[in-house]
Image: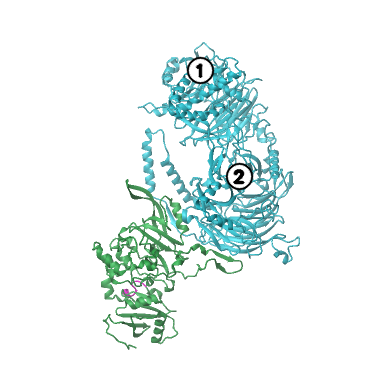
């Protein structure tokens, strides 16, 4: 099996060493790092080398942090190949006896406690973090994103929550309050709307993009200034299928830091993803986001995001089957999601630097430079950090 | 469609112009009885009546259709109103101790939406005055005004205060004549030593001018002292020492006056010239003694030519037995009636002779303002019957639960309704004409008859003539006699004579129930929830709180029949639900007599007997549909058979089953919160005019408000889900002849929308109607054929908001005509050649779907854009003011913020938005109804409808004049404001003149016999216009009736009218 043996430490070489484990058996082989091919070819190769042609497999790999992450499409396959350093460790399971809970944060670190991840990257992981359970790979879809980063002031954040027929509640409350505005006449107290509470396990909380006491500025592009609490409530509910909230986070320490300092066009990425989708998608499944920095995961076309959710009014012809009005079926069935444990406890806990924990969650799988930036001391040279972010290309906004 | 597209392409300015010609918002008139009235006044010269309310409104009424409304800047209660007789001016005293002068002013024509609206007379505030408090001491209470007296000369206002002082104000300048002030000390000095005994005299309770001798006033103090004071001579003429005083009234000769007291008695005093002190009244009576009685608050003494004087007084009831009754007694010789009202007596006056030549008052009518209604008693007809009022109808005699408006009622139906109404009240009322008939209604007679139907808590439906300014009752329908209720339903049309209770109480006091306000409902289940009337077939559908749906037909004859009863189970064997609410009403199974009018034919009772939430009637198909919180049903009332029952309950919805009680419980928290908010806004928003000692209170309030912000209200953000409670409530139903199954066959359909955004569309097979489908099956031809309903489509709106309205549009995107309209050529036949569409309005969105495919064509997401929710929608035809035949169908939409949004149809483009109702006024928003032509009504209080118009062309607003010379000059007066110096000069001269007049010898025969407007405005019903000239006192020295003299008079009046303007500028 081990035909193409190479010097393990030589990362400059174009081959990736693969160690694949299925049950008690190991297979070793190598792949061309520059030409990894497609996932289904890779999948066939695995079946071939393990001589299990008709067995449905669940493919997982250990990433650099020691987490067990799935490989089930081209994206995460390429990600796995490109980040393998140097060895790509694969774990194969029979689909029917697959144990999905093994995927996720710390799954391997806890078992193996690899020196690399424990010492360099996740110094306090074992102490603090409860395990994050990752849902089935095929359920991966965006649940939230930060959008319009290039056109909004740095102090504001525009968050999109995708409530696509899932059963998880949006899970937050808003309240009346007053906010201080700077006006030519001086400081002025004006009525404002704030997020008052997060429901544990709710969508809003699980994304970590909204927090208690964040001031709500806009709902789906409409300013809430001058509107009553009830009006804002109604607006949010009316938009709940595709809710875009612009907030002024109560915690301003995790704001997006833009490289150019100008309002738009700070990077080339905004052009390839469209101005309004410049941003970073969060996914319930962490694996999906562990992509190359320039990669913006959109599991469905941009056009669909824009499409109105309410075109999906359901018309049932008498005696016939349900026939959605719009082209997109909205009620595709989904198995119940495994409970998504709250892991973004940073807002409650003051001890670790907030960015660190969020960064760990958000940027899992992104390159080490980002993580380093995240762990840098609270008063680092701002320019350095910005540069590192630029390099990394991932916009961290938590 | 083409036309529409073309219009849209037009430039914006063009469209804006068209919009201006179509839409204009105005609140036009308030119908009904003013909420919380607090003051009453009458001008015998102009025959105008004024009512003040606790909200600071002043409303002036004359002949039917003559109405003026004014609103004080502060919403402070109006305590007293006094007319300046004949001048079209009035004074109001507010709770904040300020005095305001109002004037009827002619306005110039104005431009509204391209249409010229004629100038009308309006009521305007022209000045105000507050008595200054004495600095230093806690002055608020001592200078608090208790009574006002306007001298007959109309140039001096006497003000009685809490502290006992009497002040004098010059009119109409409203300036204090400080030198004339009569402090209490001055009176006390002239008192006998034993009466003085160191105590104060108390507040001034009453001020009355001597009816024959101008310049002499009677001052009554609370402790009982009455002083006859000569204003010009500044001296006390006589003293009368009586008991604790409530009110005073002169006899018209001036030889006697009557005082009423807090012990329930009254005393008659003789005013003999000469002796200074008078300790004993001529007579003293406690009419309802000997046991302790309540105070007689006000007393009137009216002489008659035919016999003894008429004595009218309020209160005085024996404290223990009848202390809680609201009574007014009329007494003349042996005739004695105690009017027993259902609400508190605010004030009353008599309409009587004010001509000075007449020796007697000869009262013709008694007008009593009660808290909830106005009662007028005919004093000339023996037995003193009550008179129907042509306006100020107590809409809320039983609480209004729903309303419904019918435009352009066919004359035939109108006539039959009027006759049925006359038959109902024929024996109760006097034939005499309405006594208050000042002013002229200039509004053109209504072009068409309009009906407003109100459903009430006691199971009645009242039919109102809403064609004009005055909302007048036409006919009243009671549905209670369809059921067995606790009280006997037969007692309804009984005359007062054969009421057994009446006879029992014949002894003492002789009570007589008067008025129709009845806040107590016998059985809340009788309450009317929905009304639908087919004006062509005279079929009425009425549905109520206990799931009862009644079909009624109009008949001119009495009938004795049994009502057919059907029960429709809407649960359809759904398991696991138990109804914990009220029982259904027990129908009367024996034949019952029904008077002419609408007579019940069929009764359908829903099971469970939840309140009916939607109805639809299609008289042409003989079908009616009804919905509750559990489902909906379709009933063929011709064949007396249920066609369909469909349960709309979501399996998880448990709340719907528990009945109305627990529903209230679930709302309790949010209600409490909203009340707290309202209270909070009141606390912070209230303005106090008497400020000095209240700042601490305000601070405390502010602190409290701050404190409340500590625990802010939270709102959960969660999409609506299918199992939200009450998701099954049927919100709207509609019948339509349209294309449901395919694009080639149209036929009868039924549409139903629920609280959770579901829409059910049924294709109906109505024998003999619609497509040929039925006859193909070979059933339809037979007489035994019955209606069938087949579910055609089910639409689930993704946003799941409650469906507020469904309306099918024809091929030209116009709403389908009403039943019979097309078949009887009453409207243009609907376009059946082009595809139809259906307009579905939910609380959040408006959407037009094409038919039969049901694909969305246009939509407007109102909530997502504006944050407001749709409460009421209506398709309205707006006519253009510029082109006679141009009109547009527009969707009018009232939101929970109380504003009106207008949308084009079917494009659903926003056209205009108007603020209409305060968003806190939940009942106002809930009660809103629209007319077909762009008007609407909503309740501004339990007893008043505000009428508004969204149309630039169609509006009903008061347009009236008061036939009073000075009105025509008022424009001159306002012109005068531009030339200040001259005006000032004139004014000074005029004032002197006026003062001179006031000092005229009181013996002058010419001074009008008149009391103060508050206590006893004198007038007789047939006062002529010429008599208005008499209000300028000075010109009757001789019999100067020549033309020249009249011209002189006119000039004088004109000059006098110059004052107010002159004063205003200075």
Q: Is residue B90 left or right of residue A350?
A: right
Q: Which quarter of the image is occupied by the C terminus of chain B?
A: top left
User: Is residue A106 found inside the magenta-colored segment of the image?
Assistant: yes
Q: Which residues are magenta?
A: A104-110
Q: Position of residue B732 (x, y in %)?
A: 59, 55
Q: CA distance from mark 1 to mark 2?
A: 56 Å
Q: Position of residue B12 (x, y in %)?
A: 50, 52
The chain assigned the colour cyan in the figure is B
Toward the right, the furthest residue is: B782
For this rendering, which residue is in front, B510 or B782? B782
Which is more N-terminal, label 2 or label 1?
2
Label 2 environment density (alpha carbons within 10 Å; few <14, some 14–19, many ≥20) = many
Element under label 2? strand
Q: Position of residue B17 (x, y in %)?
A: 53, 48
User: Is residue B271 found inside the magenta-colored segment of the image?
Assistant: no
The chain assigned the colour green in the figure is A
């Amino acid at each position: 099996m081990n035909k193409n043996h190479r010097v393990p430490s030589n990362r400059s070489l174009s081959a990736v060493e693969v160690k694949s484990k299925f049950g008690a058996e190991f297979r070793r082989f190598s792949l061309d790092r520059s030409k990894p091919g497609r996932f289904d070819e890779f999948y066939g190769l695995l079946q071939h080398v393990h001589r299990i042609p008709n067995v449905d497999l669940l493919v997982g790999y250990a990433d650099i942090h020691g987490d067990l992450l799935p490989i089930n499409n081209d994206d995460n396959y390429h990600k796995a190949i490109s980040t393998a350093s140097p060895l790509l460790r694969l774990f194969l399971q029979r689909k029917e006896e697959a144990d999905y809970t093994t995927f996720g944060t710390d799954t391997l670190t806890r078992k193996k406690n690899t020196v690399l991840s424990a010492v360099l990257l996740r110094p306090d992981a074992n102490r603090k973090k409860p395990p994050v359970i990752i849902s089935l790979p095929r359920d991966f879809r965006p649940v939230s994103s930060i959008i319009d980063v290039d056109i909004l002031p740095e102090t504001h954040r525009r968050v999109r929550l995708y409530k696509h027929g899932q059963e998880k509640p949006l899970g937050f409350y808003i309240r009346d309050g007053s906010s201080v505005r700077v006006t030519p006449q001086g400081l002025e107290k004006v009525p404002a709307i704030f997020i008052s509470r997060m429901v544990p396990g709710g969508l809003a909380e699980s994304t970590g993009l909204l927090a208690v006491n964040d001031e709500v500025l806009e709902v789906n592009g409409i300013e809430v200034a001058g509107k009553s609490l009830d009006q804002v409530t109604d607006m949010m509910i009316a938009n709940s299928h595709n809710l875009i909230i612009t907030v002024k986070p109560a915690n301003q320490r995790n704001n997006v830091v833009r490289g150019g300092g100008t309002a738009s066009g700070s990077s080339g990425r905004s052009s390839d993803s469209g101005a309004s989708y410049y941003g970073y998608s969060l996914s319930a499944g962490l694996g999906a986001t562990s992509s190359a920095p320039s990669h913006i995961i959109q599991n469905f076309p941009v056009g669909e995001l824009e499409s109105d959710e309410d075109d999906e009014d359901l018309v049932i012809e008498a005696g016939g089957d349900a026939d959605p009005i719009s082209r997109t079926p909205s009620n595709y069935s989904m198995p119940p999601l495994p409970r998504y444990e709250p892991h973004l406890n940073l807002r409650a806990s003051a001890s670790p630097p907030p960015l660190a924990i969020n960064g760990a969650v958000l940027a899992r799988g992104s390159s080490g430079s980002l993580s380093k930036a995240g762990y840098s001391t609270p008063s680092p040279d701002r320019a350095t950090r910005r540069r590192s972010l630029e390099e990394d290309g991932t916009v961290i906004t938590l | 469609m083409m036309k529409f597209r073309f219009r849209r392409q037009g430039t914006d300015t063009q469209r804006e112009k068209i919009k201006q010609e179509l839409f204009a918002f105005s609140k036009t008139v308030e119908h009904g009885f003013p909420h919380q009235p607090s003051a009453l006044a009458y001008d015998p010269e102009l025959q105008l009546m004024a009512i003040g309310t606790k909200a600071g409104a002043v409303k002036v009424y004359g002949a039917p259709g003559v109405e003026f409304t004014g609103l004080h800047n502060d919403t402070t209660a109006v305590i007293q109103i006094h007319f300046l007789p004949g001048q079209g001016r009035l004074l109001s005293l507010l709770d904040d101790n300020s005095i305001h002068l109002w004037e009827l002013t002619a306005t110039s024509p104005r431009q509204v939406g391209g249409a010229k609206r004629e100038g009308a007379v309006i009521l305007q505030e022209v000045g105000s005055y507050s008595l200054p408090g004495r600095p230093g001491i806690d002055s608020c209470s001592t200078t608090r005004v208790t009574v006002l007296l306007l001298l007959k000369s109309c140039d001096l206002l006497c003000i009685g205060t809490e502290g006992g002082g009497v002040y004098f104000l010059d009119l109409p300048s409203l300036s204090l004549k400080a030198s004339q002030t009569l402090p209490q000390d001055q009176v006390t000095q002239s008192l006998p030593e034993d009466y003085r005994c160191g105590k104060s005299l108390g507040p001034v309770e009453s001020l009355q001018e001597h009816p024959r001798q101008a310049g002499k006033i009677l001052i009554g103090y609370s402790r009982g002292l009455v002083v006859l004071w000569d204003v010009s001579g500044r001296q006390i003429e006589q003293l009368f020492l009586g008991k604790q005083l409530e009110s005073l009234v002169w006899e018209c000769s001036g030889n006697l006056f009557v005082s009423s007291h807090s012990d329930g008695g009254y005393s008659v005093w003789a005013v003999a010239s000469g002796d200074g002190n008078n300790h004993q009244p001529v007579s003293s009576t406690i009419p309802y003694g000997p046991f302790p009685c309540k105070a007689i608050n006000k007393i009137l003494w009216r002489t008659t030519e035919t016999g003894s004087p008429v004595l009218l007084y309020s209160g005085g009831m024996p404290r223990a037995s009848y202390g809680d009754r609201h009574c007014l007694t009329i007494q003349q010789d042996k005739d004695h009636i105690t009017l027993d009202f259902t609400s508190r007596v605010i004030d009353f006056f008599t309409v009587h002779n004010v001509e000075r030549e007449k020796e007697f008052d000869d009262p013709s009518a008694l007008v009593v303002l009660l808290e909830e209604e106005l009662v007028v008693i005919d004093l000339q007809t023996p037995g003193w019957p009550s008179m129907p009022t042509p306006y100020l109808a107590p809409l809320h005699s039983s609480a209004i639960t729903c309303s419904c408006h019918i435009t352009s009622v066919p004359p035939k139906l109108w006539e039959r309704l009027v006759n049925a109404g006359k038959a109902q009240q024929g024996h109760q009322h006097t034939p005499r004409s309405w006594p208050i008939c000042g002013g002229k209604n200039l509004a053109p007679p209504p072009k068409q008859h309009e009906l407003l139907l109100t459903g009430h808590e006691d199971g009645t439906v009242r039919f109102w003539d809403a064609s004009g300014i005055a909302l007048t009752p036409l006919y009243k329908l009671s549905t209670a006699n369809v059921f067995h209720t606790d009280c006997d339903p037969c007692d309804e049309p009984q005359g007062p004579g054969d009421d057994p209770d009446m006879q029992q109480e014949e002894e003492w006091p002789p009570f007589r129930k008067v008025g129709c306000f009845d806040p107590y409902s016998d059985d809340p289940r009788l309450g009317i929830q929905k009304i639908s009337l087919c004006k062509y077939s005279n079929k009425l559908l009425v549905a109520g709180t206990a799931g009862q749906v009644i079909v009624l037909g109009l008949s001119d004859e009495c009938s004795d029949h049994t009502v057919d009863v059907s029960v429709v189970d809407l649960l359809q064997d759904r398991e696991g639900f138990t109804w914990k609410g009220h029982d259904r009403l027990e129908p009367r199974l024996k034949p019952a007599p029904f008077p002419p009018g609408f007579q019940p034919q069929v009764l359908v009772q829903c099971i469970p007997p939840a309140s009916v939430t939607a109805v639809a009637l299609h008289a042409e198909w003989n079908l009616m549909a009804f919905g509750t919180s559990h489902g909906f049903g379709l009933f063929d009332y011709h064949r007396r058979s249920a066609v369909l029952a469909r349960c709309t309950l979501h399996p998880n919805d448990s709340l719907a089953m528990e009945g109305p009680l627990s529903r209230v419980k679930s709302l309790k928290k949010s209600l409490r919160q909203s009340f707290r908010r309202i209270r909070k806004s009141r606390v912070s928003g209230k303005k106090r005019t008497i400020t000095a000692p209240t700042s601490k209170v305000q601070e405390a309030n502010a602190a409290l408000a701050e404190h409340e912000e500590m625990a802010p209200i939270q709102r959960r953000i969660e999409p609506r889900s299918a199992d939200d409670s009450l998701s099954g409530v049927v919100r709207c139903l509609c019948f339509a002849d349209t294309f449901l199954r395919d694009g080639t066959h149209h036929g009868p359909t039924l549409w139903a929308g629920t609280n959770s955004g579901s829409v059910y569309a049924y294709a109906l097979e109505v024998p003999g109607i619609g497509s040929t489908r039925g006859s193909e099956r070979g059933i339809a031809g037979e007489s035994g054929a019955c209606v069938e309903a087949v579910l055609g489509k089910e639409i689930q709106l993704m946003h799941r908001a409650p469906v507020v309205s469904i309306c099918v549009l024809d091929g030209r995107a116009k709403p389908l005509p009403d039943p019979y309209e097309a078949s009887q050529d009453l409207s243009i036949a609907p376009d059946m050649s082009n595809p139809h569409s259906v307009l579905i309005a939910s609380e959040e969105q408006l959407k037009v779907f094409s038919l039969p495919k049901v694909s969305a064509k246009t939509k407007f997401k109102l909530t997502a854009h504006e944050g407001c929710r749709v409460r009421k929608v209506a398709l309205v035809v707006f006519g253009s003011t510029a082109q006679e035949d141009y009109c547009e169908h527009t969707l009018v939409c009232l939101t929970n913020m109380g504003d009106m949004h207008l949308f084009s149809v079917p494009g659903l483009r926003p056209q205009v938005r108007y603020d209409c109702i305060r968003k806190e006024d939940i009942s106002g928003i809930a009660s809103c109804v629209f007319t077909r032509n762009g008007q609407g009504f909503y309740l501004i209080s339990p007893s008043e409808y505000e009428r508004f118009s969204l149309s630039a062309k169609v509006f009903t607003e008061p347009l009236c004049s008061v036939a009073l010379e000075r009105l025509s000059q008022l424009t001159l007066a306002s012109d005068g404001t531009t030339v200040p110096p001259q005006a000032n000069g004139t004014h000074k001269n005029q004032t002197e003149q006026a003062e001179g007049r006031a000092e005229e010898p009181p013996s002058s025969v010419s001074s009008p016999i008149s009391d103060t407007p508050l206590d006893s405005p004198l007038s007789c019903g047939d006062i002529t216009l010429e008599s208005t000239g008499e209000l300028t006192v000075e010109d009757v020295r001789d019999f100067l009736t020549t033309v020249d003299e009249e011209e002189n008079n006119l000039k004088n009046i004109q000059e006098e009218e110059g004052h107010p303007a002159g004063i205003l500028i200075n």
